[in-house]
Image: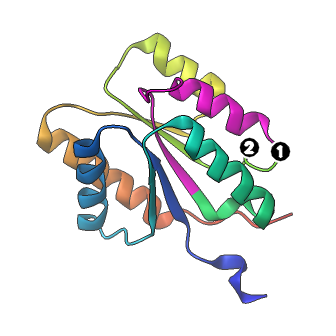
Amino acid sequence: MGDQHRAVSIVMVEDDEGHARLIEKNLRRAGVYNEIIGFDNGTAALQFLLSDAEDHANGGSRLVLLDLNVPDMTGIDVLAILKSNEHTRRLPVIVLTTTDDKREIDKCYDAGANVYITKPLNYDNFASAIRQLGLFLAVIQVPETA
């Protein structure tokens, strides 16, 4: 019974090894010690999330950090698939991307993204964006299963 509230683990979909390490380092520095499960393509991440959600029937235990530029499909595709599946549509998704194109941003929100963070190439901005994200993660409540 007690594991209803097990810690949220973070599924990071990011194909740039350097960015992935930087994101992880900054989450840790921000005090987020949740498990991070990394994928460098959308297909593998979706396979994991979809089968995982069906196993647990408790989509609340994952948070998705999604880079829009993954090699095999767009982040929007990944998002749309997650949001159209009954087992994963309640997963919080944070989109990370290097574009701040308004149309792209609107597309993300239309597809169901919860939060959108632009990756500035400037290290300090990026670090502080990730630290804010860390604070956001720290206060996330796992939604009760209905």
Residue 64 is labelled as: none
* In the image: residue 106, left or right of residue 14: right
Q: Is residue 64 visible?
A: yes
* Residue 89: mark: 2
Q: Residue at x 45, y 28 (%)?
A: 68
| Disc 1, SS | loop
* Residue located at (13% from left, 44% from top): 124
Residue corresponding to mark 1: 86
User: Which segment did they paint magenta?
Assistant: 63-85
Residue 138 at x, y percent in the picture: 44, 66
How packed is label 1: few (under 14 Cα within 10 Å), some, or many (20 or more)?
A: few
Q: CA distance from mark 2 to mark 1?
A: 6 Å
Q: Are marks 2 and 1 in contact (CB under 8 Å)?
A: yes
User: Can residue 112 be seen here?
Assistant: no
Q: Residue furthest right?
A: 146
Up/down of 130 relative to 16, above or below: below
- Of residue 126 and residue 79, the one placed in the foreground of this image is 79
Where residue 34 sits, quadrant-wise, is: bottom left
Q: Residue at x 30, y 38 (%)?
A: 16
Is residue 73 one of those drawn in magenta?
yes
Local SS, label 2: loop
Camera-side residue of 44 and 61: 44
Callout 1, which amino acid?
Answer: Glu
Q: Residue furthest bottom?
A: 2
Is residue 37 highlighted in magenta? no
103 relative position to 46: left or right = left
Identify which amino acid the numbered label 2 is placed on. Answer: Arg
In the image, residue 137 lies at what x, y percent?
45, 60
Residue at image location 45% in from the left, 69% down from the top:
35
